[in-house]
Image (spheres, rainbow, N blue to C red):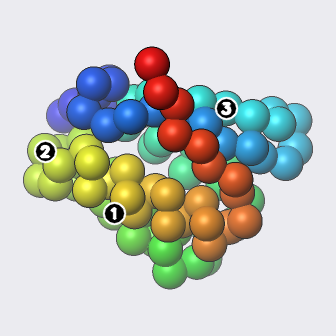
Amino acid sequence: MNWNTSSAFAPVGLVLRGRETHTVVRTLGDAAYLLIRDWPFDDGEEYMIAVKACIDAICGDVAPEQFREAFLRAADEAGIAALTIVH
């Protein structure tokens, strides 16, 4: 399992509602934590695809970049503003 993959996809900055107003997702572990714990809802189609893609990426079954694309679609579905962080 590859929880801390950070170089495989560009970090994503998200603007959330609630106690944390913004966060940066740098690793698959960060993404998994956010999807399971802090996502605003858990019944969207893109959300479910992103959760599965995250698990698949952690297990090495899909490329982290494929997960990132699914993650961005889920953010859009949830009305979460997402920004690519450039180093």
Which residue in the structure is indicated by mark 2?
Answer: 60
What residue do we see at 37% from left, 51% from top?
A: 68
What residue do we see at 31% from left, 59% from top?
A: 53
Between the residue at mark 3 and the residue at mark 2, the CA separation in whole angstroms equals: 25 Å
Q: Residues within 10 Å of mark 3 (few under 14, many from 20)?
A: some
In the rendered image, which quarter is residue 56 located in? bottom left
Residue 78 visible: yes
Where is residue 10? Give x, y as percent: 38, 34
Residue 25 visible: no
Where is residue 47? Give x, y as percent: 52, 68
Which amino acid does the dot numbered 3 rest on?
Thr
**Quadrant in which the N terminus is drawn:** top left
Which residue in the structure is indicated by mark 1?
Answer: 52
Local SS, label 3: strand
- Tag 3 near tag 2, CB within 8 Å: no
Which amino acid does the dot numbered 1 rest on?
Lys
What residue do we see at 46% from left, 56% from top?
A: 71
> What is the number of the mark on residue 41?
none
> What is the number of the mark on residue 23?
3
- Tag 2 near tag 1, CB within 8 Å: no
Between the residue at mark 3 and the residue at mark 1, the CA separation in whole angstroms equals: 21 Å
In the figure, 35 relative to 30: above or below? below
In the rendered image, which quarter is residue 21 located in? top right
Q: Nearer the viewer, residue 13 or 49?
A: 13
Q: Residues within 10 Å of mark 2 (few under 14, many from 20)?
A: few
Q: How many numbered discs, if any?
A: 3
